[in-house]
Image: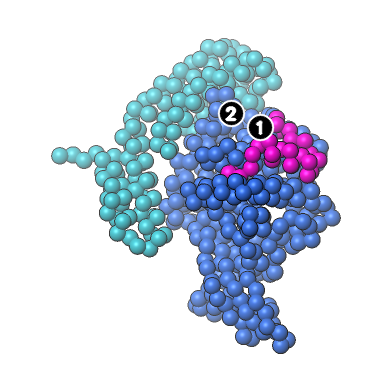
Amino acid sequence: MTVTPHELLAQMASTFRHEIGPAVDEPFAKTQAFMAAVILSKLAGQLQAAEADAQAAGDERRAVVAALRARLGSACPARLGDALTDLGHDGSDAAWSRLVGSLYAERDGLGADEFDALLGVVRSALRARLDRALAYAS
Amino acid sequence: MTDAAAPVETRIAGYLAGKLGADDLRLRDVQRIAVGWSHETWLLDASWTADGVQHERGFCVRRDPGNALLREMSDLGVQFDVLRALEATPVPTPRAYFFEPGVDVLGAPFLVMEKVAGVCPSPWGSDGRRFYEAAAGRGVLPGSFTDALVAIHNVDWRAAGLDFLGVPALGTDFAAREIAKWRSLIDATGIQPDPVLTDLICWLEANVPSTDRLVLVHGAYRTGNLLIDDDRVSAVLDWETEVIGDPMYDVAYVLSELNRERTELLSNIVERDAFRRRYEQGTGIEIDDDACRYYQLLYAMRSAAFWMSATGLFASGRNTDLRLARTAWSIPVVLDNAARALGY
């Protein structure tokens, strides 16, 4: 029998919640035990969904890069183009933030309507990222 | 210098005896509160004889543990100076007695102030909600809550000597400074901001409101940061984020949904219209709803910075409290609220 990492974390959470926490008398330590259970449960959920989440994030990222490149065409400002190139290779928070920052930096040159349209595309993808994070937040 | 191995209570007693010129000082009812998240706090009663006269007084001691939340922006020395400056004003605050910047006495800087009568229930728990619901029903606390904010905003801060807090220029300077201040806290965490937070910060920077009036702003005015005694605000606490700035910054926080739970009452105690009427009447300042909506988004940035700071403290090993680690999952909740307000 193989135990997956997320199953192991979930079982550890259960042990903290049902056995260790109730057995601890000192209030601060008791709180820590129950908090460990909460954190391990969240990590277990995130680990279980990590592969599917990464797949979805990659698909969204590529779609955003393609949509913005298509919309901007040859008029793409250099800073924005660089940020899109980075995001094409790298789905980190930093790469997404660079794209958002470069959009705001080019706002005047793009014009209000174009800026809103481009930011709207980015925000759709960010909304999806956020929704995945919220699945473990509460 | 005191004996570093002695219990904290003994060291506090020795320190107070020296400051008060007492050789028979005794402490009783020593309580330690607020463990782990912020400054460490002790409440205690002291009795002593000086110059042949018997004295009794309650004290509150706050120590900087060196790894508390908001430590980068919250200096006990500044809190001491603010409390001293407010003593001559109508703002209900504890009297500040002593500030010790060194580490010899308690191992860290600390502040000694008056122990004010009152309770400070958390508005987030069921006991606190029941407390505020009952107090709201009796009708006195809602007005007192509003009046204490009015008193803060009516302070002649120049006359009180509070300009050491920094005075922004009229116009957009105040909001720009606040964004920069909280951005610096985010940078100090060493955690890469979520792109939704980047979007929020960029939006805030691109839409900075102008203000033509500067007041003393508390920066976190809500139940939970106020002592309540006999249905009145007996002391405004937590002077950690005060600033000279736009009065709507505080008003926005009061109007925010962040500060109430399972009730329409602002901060769990005051009806919106009643607050608006009393505040505007007391200050002569008309509430600007557009500015409040802006500042509520700035509070979202602050909240994200706060939780990132908490997460960073744990991740770096500077604070081992697992409740700080749990706050990593509070960040998406804050950003969700901000994203909805921004339209996505």
Q: Which residue is mark 2?
A: B341
Secondary structure of the magenta portion, mostly? helix
Residue lying at the far left in this picture: please name it. A1
What is chain A's hue in the picture?
cyan
Query: Does B333 appear in magenta?
Result: no
Task: Give SS at disc 1.
Answer: helix
Q: Residues within 10 Å of mark 1 (few under 14, many from 20)?
A: some
| Front residue of B249 and B206 | B249
Distance CA(mark 2)–CA(mark 1): 9 Å
Q: Are marks 2 and 1 in contact (CB under 8 Å)?
A: yes
Q: Which residues are magenta?
A: B267-291
Q: Which residue is mark 1?
A: B293
Q: Is residue B32 left or right of residue B142?
A: left
The image quarter containing residue B208 is top right
| Front residue of B225 and A50 | B225
| Front residue of B209 and B201 | B209
